[in-house]
Image (cartoon, helix red, strand yellow):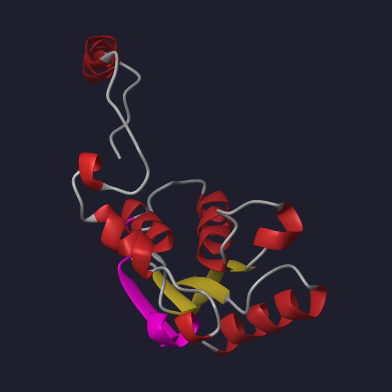
Amino acid sequence: MEQALEQAQQGLALGHGGPFGAVIVVENQIIGAGWNQVVHLNDPTAHAEMQAIRKACQHQQNFNLAGAVLYTTCEPCPMCLSAAYWARIERLVYAATGEDAAVSGFDDSLIAAEMCKPSGERLMPSRQIMRDASLQLFKAWQSSDQRIDY
């Protein structure tokens, strides 16, 4: 966790974004680290956890981080938590809570609530089109000899 806190300090010193840092550890070795770079990169996905996951996957040359532990200075937002699950990270250790972050203006409770609603009830309007064409892509994926499940 100390390394995650140092990542957050580095990002703050550079003015790259919010006060967040993360590291990913496998067998007591850091394989990925990052700080929030949303402002610096003009990228709303450049959260500390996302940066650490990207670097860890590059280090491992694999999208599957089974056995890894994610240390982060704050409880992950819905996007970062989802990415951790997609990466098959085994365990999460965090310092501040989501409620702590909300006090400083980083409130993701709306996003978390929206994700639980059916698409037609969300604040962001959405509609479904061209489902059959998309289903053809899924069929092609299912029969592909280059398919790699994740």
Is 67 or 54 nearer to us in this picture?
54
Measured as percent of width and height from the top left, residue 16 is found at 74, 67
Q: Residue at x 45, y 46 (%)?
A: 62
Q: Position of residue 71 (x, y in %)?
A: 46, 78
**Where does the C terminus fall, quadrant-wise?**
top left
Asked which quadrant contains residue 136, the reply is: top left
Quick one: which residue is furthest to the left in this view? Answer: 118
Q: Is residue 35 above or below residue 8?
A: above
Query: Is residue 100 located in the magenta-colored stretch of the structure?
Result: yes
Is residue 33 left or right of 14 when viewed as pictured? Answer: left
Q: Is residue 27 visible?
A: no
Which one is in front, 72 or 77?
A: 77
Percent x, y of residue 86? 33, 51
Count how many numbered circles sit on residues in the image. Answer: 0
Residue at far right of view: 14
Query: Which residue occupies 72% across, 74% down?
Result: 11
Query: Which sits in the foreground, 44 or 140?
Result: 44
**For residue 83, side relative to residue 5 (left or right):** left
Q: Nearer the viewer, residue 94 or 125?
A: 125
Which residue is pictured at 63% across the width and 74% down the height?
A: 18
Tell me if I can see residue 19 in this picture: yes
Residue 64 pos. (x, y %): 38, 50
27 sits left or right of 44 in the view = left
Quadrant of residue 132 within the rendered picture: top left
Q: Which residues are magenta?
A: 88-101
